[in-house]
Amino acid sequence: MADFSTDVLVIGTGPAGSATSALLASYGVKVMVVNRYRWLSNTPRAHITNQRTMEVLRDLGPEVEAEAMMHATPQALMGENVFCESLTGEELGRMKSWGTSPLSKAEHLMSSPCEMNDLPQTFMEPILFKTACARGAEARMSVEYVSHEQDAEGVTTTCRDRLSGQTFTVRSKYLVGADGGNSLVAEHLGLPFEGKMGVGGSMNILFKADLSRHVAHRPSVLYWVMQPGADVGGIGMGLVRMVRPWNEWLIVWGYDITQPAPVVDEAMATQVARQLIGDPELEIDLISANTWTVNNCFATHMQKGRVFIMGDAAHRHPPSNGLGSNTSIQDGYNLAWKLAAVVKGQAGPALLESYRAERAPIARQIVTRANQSIAEFGPIFEALGMDGGVDHDKIARSMAARCDATPAGEAQREALRKAIAFKAYEFDCHGVEMNQRYASGAVVTDGQTPPAPLADMELHYQPTTFPGARLPHVWVFDRKGGKHSTLDLTGKGQFTLITGIGGEAWAEAAEALSLPIRVVKIGPRCAIEDHSGDWARAREITDAGCLLVRPDQHVAWRSPGLTADPKADLSRVLHAILGL
Ligand code: FDA
């Protein structure tokens, strides 16, 4: 007999664990969450928060989205990504990043009701964790996961209370390992991983210093510094990252992974900060310093029986592209509704297998993308003739050569501009953030073919209602004039059926099912009106057709028009998706 029991036990209160607990609690599932430390993240590691993640927060509630926006540095201050010798030194170039160039901003505005922003992990985690606790999650801090055993009916997990030293057991229907890059849960499951850990070495130096005079005129999250050693070990170049504008900063500087990790004491931290900022007199108020390794590794399976892994436990990669916490929260959004449906008896356990089928390819994609982004700093070094080891004199000569009124100087200027612009694949990679599409048992295509890509799918989001894709966002209106995103009509742990005039039979079919399905009719004099015609252009079905949208806002199935037997079709599709 276990000491405690719950429906789902979550290990870890990072972005993945806190989001999953908040979602499960919101869906009315009993959830317990444990963290080995007494509080949440004490360093602001993740910060770039993309639109898809903000949509998850919006689905948790407008107050959750609003609190995040209140603490976030707004998108408008994120964009002048600078490449320079040092913050006080010569600038090599700049690029508009994170959806702030006019064209990119238009794509962001058209794609989502939410704004990309910079929200340090030290703010994000408390928002998610508080939401989880306020909605009923049982949280136990200073408690660590030790081991687990599963059987046909559930999982028995042994935990240790680090204050008393005592162990206790928790019996749950399901166990989620959201325990980070050194996941013990993943290790105990023996899940297969591809790739390598520890392919580079990096140090984080977190400090306070007012640097307004160097940056306020070119507001950005990231200032990339080209100096001797800048291409060694770390994330592509030296980095001075804004944590809070413009008086809290995180420096990321690489070290050679074949050598022992350096001890970053106050003297070393100050010296590195002075060097990257280019001010030998700079005084910093050091908050913390630590070293970490660059990983290139992902799980090809994320489930064994009743136990799942998510977040960094499943995908381990450098911070390039800012995908870690975002993907971790999105893993939770994928799994939580499925666990809720199974725990509530609305779905069979087969539904849970779609988690791996849908999220493992994303894990592979983002780990590959993040590591590729490090390599893609190479052309900048090459353009300056500084690839393969750099010294001060060589940098000075290369910087000078790029100002020459010669064909070689002109070619160098062009190569540098191109190399910097190519970094859009790291700093303006909207497609990677928004194009996630699923193919699994929880999606029914009925043999329809996916739309051909119209543009580079890494750089650009391509809206579609093809089954497996996220429902496109457009603004629609209720009869009182209230403005809603199409995404706002869905989610909250429930399936939604969207139809239009002539689609009444779909509504009747949905009402006849035992599963609660929200029905939304869009059209003139309907509950929701499409005054601009944007929905008619986005939906890729006729008025009398329907879209069945999953609780995570991905399209489960669509019918281009009314069928001969809507009741039978809807029932067939839902039985397949829910594994009944
Ligand atoms: P995370 O590691 O955050 O949390 C793990 C949790 O499990 C913690 O609560 C821990 O205490 C707990 N735990 C571990 N073992 C346990 C045990 N045995 N028992 C109980 N609890 C246990 N990402 C992003 O999206 N945008 C960005 O801009 C950046 N930037 C960035 C910069 C830098 C410098 C770094 C190093 C990283 C980033 N990231 C990022 C990545 C991001 O920080 C990372 O992907 C997420 O924190 C992963 O969240 P998880 O919840 O999966 O793990």
Image: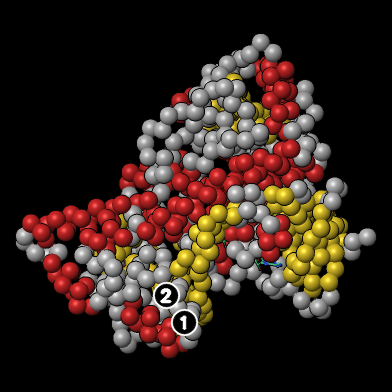
Residue 282 vs residue 574: left or right?
left
Badge 2, how many Cα within 10 Å: few under 14, some, many 20+?
Answer: many
Residue 234 at x, y = what percent? 42, 68
Residue 494 at x, y = what percent? 70, 37
Badge 1, how many Cα within 10 Å: few under 14, some, many 20+?
Answer: some
Residue furthest left as drawn: 405
Residue 332 vs residue 397: left or right?
right
Residue that badge 1 annotates: 262
Q: Are marks 2 and 1 in contact (CB under 8 Å)?
A: yes
Q: Distance between the residues labelled 2 and 1?
A: 8 Å
Q: Height in image: 469 above or below 100?
A: above
The image quarter in which residue 169 lies: bottom right
Residue that badge 2 annotates: 255
Residue type at tag 2: Tyr
Residue 314 at x, y = what percent? 60, 55
Circle 1: element type: loop
Nearest to the observer: residue 57 or residue 302: 302
Q: Height in image: 54 above or below 253?
A: above
For image coordinates 31% across by 52% down, the residue present is 422
Q: Quadrant of the C terminus?
A: top right
Circle 2: element type: strand
For image coordinates 37% across by 71% down, the residue present is 232
Q: Height in image: 408 above or below 465?
A: below
Residue type at tag 1: Pro
Nearest to the observer: residue 551 or residue 419: 419
For image coordinates 77% across by 36% down, the residue present is 347
Point out the tag, 2 or 1, that comes first from the N-terminus.
2
